[in-house]
Image (spheres, rainbow, N blue to C red):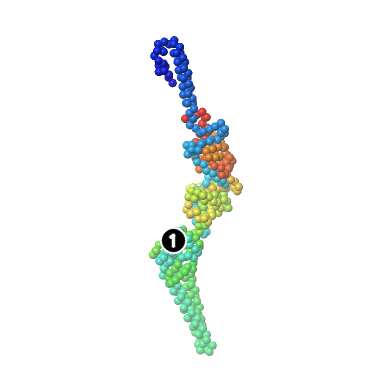
Amino acid sequence: MQIHLQAFLPASAFVNPSSWRWRWRLAMLAVLASAGLSAGCTDSASQPLARAPTSDSVPADELRFAEGSPQLTMIRSAPAEAFPMPVAQPLEARLVVDEDVTSRLSVPVSGRVTALLARPGDTVRRGQPLLALDSPDLGSALADLERAEADLALKQKTVARLQDLSTGEAVARRDLEQAQADVAQARAERARAERRLHNLNPGGQPVQGQRLTLGSPLDGVVVERNANLAMEASPALSSPLFVVSSLRQLWVLADLPERLAGQVHVGDKLVIESDAVPQARREARVLQVGPGVDPATRRVVLRAAVDNRDGRLMPEMFVRAWLQAGPGAAAVRLPNTAVVVRGVQSFVFVETAPGRFKRRRVELAARGGDDSFVREGVAAGERVVTQGALLLDAEMSAPADATP
């Protein structure tokens, strides 16, 4: 700050510098100049640093931000969740229908489809009609049975009449014996016709003339339909006309690494998660561990059953299957973005109050590609910073006298 004396003193003062008035004015200007410089320095020193507002009472492992601070827009927190301790990384798995409660329906006789009575996705009851088929072969078999029954009835009447006449020796015994043999042959023919009709309609589906109605054998959902109106259907078709399954329970098929095959047994528990249904985590029970290893993938097929009475899971949905370490083994699961690693130590930031974050050391039980499992340091339900933890760590690690 420069002070020009000419701006404050008259020209006569410079002519006679020994004047006492000049000396007094010069002293006053010096005092004013000193006060102005002090004020300028004070204004510069009073500018705040661009970092988190702190005070002497804030602990060293805690950060506080005022409401509306721009730093808060980059920070997200969520409650920590309890999770069973896993043995390894989650297995990639998919859901399929439970084959124990699934029926793949085909027609037992050749014919033409005349009516479709159910659509894919329909819920059906046991015995509910799905398809109507017009079958000449079935009509022929039914006619053969009716003809055999009529022939048997006629021959039985003949035998009864001859027996009445034989008491008075009105007919020869040979004629009676021949009539009895004819009845036996008629019974055999009726039995053959019944067996043929049963083979053409083994499920006992309703038959009217030569029209057969294909019904559902169980309560469930029509998962698949491969039938069309007027199509020629026969037992030789490679695909079933209808697939009906009960979706109250599904199978989980997972690829188990070869090194873990010996650690999994029938009856063990799996934890199933799906990105499509984030809140539908549930347990599954291992039904079978494959008897062999796939030579191409070095994996063993693991099959488990999962309850789906609420219907939120669907066949062919991809899921993650976690193998549990054992009964009672639990941890707290956090996303990897929440964990700050410094050397051999790991830290997280816990939101103790709005705008207040405390750094806390944790002990990791396991760390995967997306999640970390904490054994000690954080309790389930505490709000942990899941986005912006590195920014908070950098803010806390910055020197107190850092300048922007």
Local crowd size for mark 1, using a 10 Å CA cut-off: few (<14), some (14–19), many (≥20): some
The quadrant in which the N terminus is found is top left
What residue is rendered at 42% in x and 64% in y? 116
What residue is rendered at 48% in x and 54% in y? 314
Disc 1 residue type? Arg
**Quarter occupied by residue 226:** bottom left
The residue most toward the front is 21
Camera sees residue 29 = yes
What residue is rendered at 49% in x and 26% in y? 45
Side of 379 relative to 183 (left or right): right
Q: Position of residue 222 (x, y in %)?
A: 46, 60
392 relative to 132, above or below? above
395 relative to 325, above or below? above
Q: Position of residue 287 (x, y in %)?
A: 55, 54
Camera sees residue 137 = no
Foreground residue, 374 or 269? 374
SS state under label 1: loop
**Quarter occupied by residue 121:** bottom left
337 relative to 262, above or below? above
Foreground residue, 345 or 160? 345
What residue is rendered at 48% in x and 52% in y? 317
Foreground residue, 191 or 306? 306
The mark total stands at 1
Foreground residue, 286 or 199? 286
Q: Position of residue 220 (x, y in %)?
A: 49, 60
Side of 111 relative to 379 (left or right): left
Residue that mark 1 sits on: 119
Q: Position of residue 103 (x, y in %)?
A: 49, 61
The residue most toward the right is 328
